[in-house]
């Protein structure tokens, strides 16, 4: 287990813009406010989405596209630096009208409505390649 203590230095409430990409707006906030590390939670609705599923044995992501309106029942993730750019590592649970849910790593989603709470940490967290999982993880 790797861990470190962090202190929070900022809190932000976002109302995401209709028609724009969900994750891109989080990365834009990080760039505009100079957020090097943080945590976020959100909810809302999207008009479509692409989720990624990580195949642990193959070490590859598989995109799964949903061209339908979905509720964002839960969205959680973290902000950090990846290759010198803000990166929003985003997971979401999305629900259909009948209550069936799909979930995974959110790559893209067109916002219908979204509200997100972001907590900024007073530390730099950089993603680096982890040989065991073949993923870019926090240090």
Image (cartoon, rainbow, N blue to C red):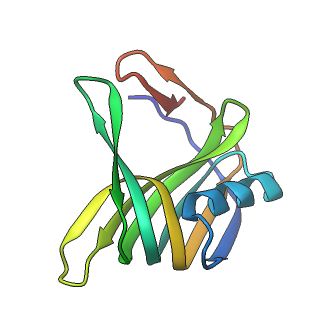
Query: Going 67% across and 54% down the picture, which residue do you hit?
Result: 27
Q: Relative to residue 106, is residue 118 depicted above or below?
A: below
Where residue 49 sits: x, y (%)? 42, 62
Query: Going 50% across and 57% down the picture, which residue do you hit?
Result: 108
Q: Relative to residue 38, is residue 134 depicted above or below?
A: above
In this rendering, would 77 be left or right of 23?
left
Q: Could you say which quadrant of the image residue 83 lies in?
A: top right
In this figure, what is the number of numbered marks?
A: 0
In this rendering, would 77 be left or right of 122?
left
Q: Could you say which quadrant of the image residue 98 lies in?
A: bottom left
Residue placed farthest to the front in the image? 67
In this rendering, would 34 be left or right of 123?
right
30 or 64, which is in the foreground? Answer: 64
Where residue 100 sits: x, y (%)? 18, 73
129 or 6, which is in the foreground? Answer: 129
Quadrant containing the N terminus is top left
Where residue 5 sits: x, y (%)? 57, 42
27 or 111, which is in the foreground? Answer: 111
45 or 81, which is in the foreground? Answer: 45
Where residue 26 sits: x, y (%)? 64, 60
Q: Relative to residue 114, is residue 9 depicted above or below?
A: above
């Amino acid at each position: 287990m790797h861990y470190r203590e962090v202190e929070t230095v900022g809190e932000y409430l976002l109302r995401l813009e209709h028609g724009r990409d969900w994750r891109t707006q989080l990365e834009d906030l990080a760039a505009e406010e100079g957020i090097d590390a943080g945590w976020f939670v959100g909810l809302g609705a999207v008009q479509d989405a692409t989720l990624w599923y990580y195949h642990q044995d193959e070490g590859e992501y598989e995109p799964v596209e949903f061209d339908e309106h979905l509720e964002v029942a839960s969205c959680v993730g973290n902000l950090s630096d990846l290759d010198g750019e803000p990166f929003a590592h985003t997971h979401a649970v999305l629900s259909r009208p009948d209550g069936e849910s799909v979930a995974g790593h959110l790559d893209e989603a067109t916002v219908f409505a979204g509200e997100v709470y972001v907590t900024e940490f007073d530390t730099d967290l950089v993603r680096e390649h982890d040989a065991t999982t073949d993923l870019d993880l926090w240090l």
